[in-house]
Image: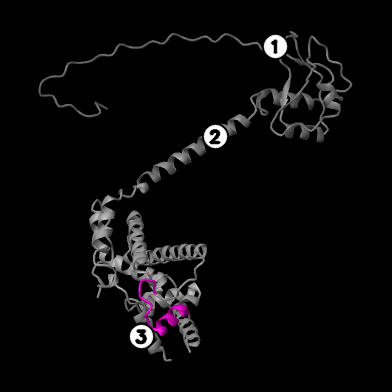
Amino acid sequence: MTDDELDRRLRDALRAEPSPDLAARIRERIATTPAPPERWRWAPALAGGLAAAVIVAAVLATRESQPTGPSPRSAESTRAVAAAAAPGTASPRASTPDPGSAIAVGASTRWSQPARPRRSAPVERALPVAAEDGDIAGAQVAFSPAEAMATEASGLTLAPEPLSIPALDIAPLALAPLVVAPLLVAPLAVGEQIIEGGPQ
Amino acid sequence: MHERADRLPGAWIAVDDSDREAFGARVHESSGLAFRVAYGVLRHRQQAEDVAQETLVRAFRAFRQLRDRAKFRAWLVRVAWRLALDEQRAHRRRLARDGQAMDPRPRDVGPDVAAEVRALWAAIDRLPDRLRQPLVLASIEGHTTAEVAALLELPEGTVKSRLFEARRLLKEWLQ
């Protein structure tokens, strides 16, 4: 059997014509079929909304994971490091802070054997701080875990003695009265040309 | 003889508020193509018309995404082929449930059909789907190899080799 003969037999076997009314029946059914939904018109809006929702959720999640206490790089933290770097310091283990001038909330025991802190939570350490008036409250200093570990690794320790901070003397600021000259406005004559920007 | 869609002027199908009218203008040629594809699988005129009708309704629903005429015809062939195979499997399940055997001859012709035609249909049924589909498409509407390749979205060389293999098997089984 040749290819041509096979093709002829195949064409004969597959030759078929639909009923004359097939197209009419299909048109009739399509006429009663609901129009296809225009899904592509609201798809960009949906994508934009989803993207905005993801961004908002990410921002909220980031804010919730941040510590609410003082910043590790706050002035108190800086003061604590400066105090620790003071000459003649010893280990805080030997110090017995005075309840009136320093605050110790059990952190001194943790100081000797610091537990590995959580990653995001600041570590509160007792810092014996005393001013001349002995009335500085809230001497707890918040360290970030990285700062605490770096401080311990560097061998810096806290001052055993209360830190003396002189009282700040601020002179009153004298302000001279401000004299404002009256503003003179001359009437505009008829026919006078207005120069933009005014006279130099 | 139907006018070939890919030889008609205009390579794009209009898609706007007159989608229904634009699609209706394509129904005649597309229904013929879908019917012949389905008939190549089912060999039953009424079932092939049902498949063609379902194929065209689905095509209408997806008309907005089928702007390119060539892609529309390729999509139509694939859907008609798949629906026809589904119908064929359902028919075989019904026959098996009723304890009957599948008759390879066209089911809407009488028992006086020539024996060689029945043998040819049986041989076509034995072909794997990847060989049967290009063979049927090449045997209807005078499709060339390039047109079959476009309909199946396959390389032309792949279609040529599959057609060669299909013909070789048919000749072997029919002798």
A39 versus B3 height, above or below: above
Mark 2 belongs to which subunit? A
How many numbered marks, from 0 up? 3
Q: Residue furthest right?
A: A94
1 vs 2, front mark: 2
Which comes sooner in the sequence, label 3 or label 1? 3
In the image, what residue type sits under mark 2? Answer: Val
Mark pair 2, 3: CA separation: 71 Å
The reply to whether residue B71 is in sight is no
SS type, badge 2:
helix
The residue located at (59%, 34%) in the rendering is: A62
On the picture, is B91 further left or further right than A134?
A: left
Residue closer to the observer: A84 or A99: A99
Q: Identify residue for label 3.
A: A8
Q: Identify residue for label 2.
A: A59
3 vs 1, front mark: 3
On the picture, is B71 further left or further right than A20?
A: right
Which comes sooner in the sequence, label 2 or label 3? 3
Screen quadrant of the N terminus of chain B: bottom left
SS type, badge 1:
loop
> Picture quarter containing residue A25?
bottom left
In the image, what residue type sits under mark 3? Answer: Arg
Q: Identify residue for label 1.
A: A167
Give the x, y percent position of residue B27. Answer: 27, 62
> Picture quarter containing residue A79?
top right
The residue located at (82%, 29%) in the rendering is: A114
Evaluate if marks 2 and 3 touch, with contact meaning CB atoms under 8 Å apart.
no
The residue located at (17%, 16%) in the rendering is: A187
Q: Which residues are magenta?
A: B106-123
The residue located at (78%, 32%) in the rendering is: A151
Residue B118 belongs to the span the image colors magenta: yes
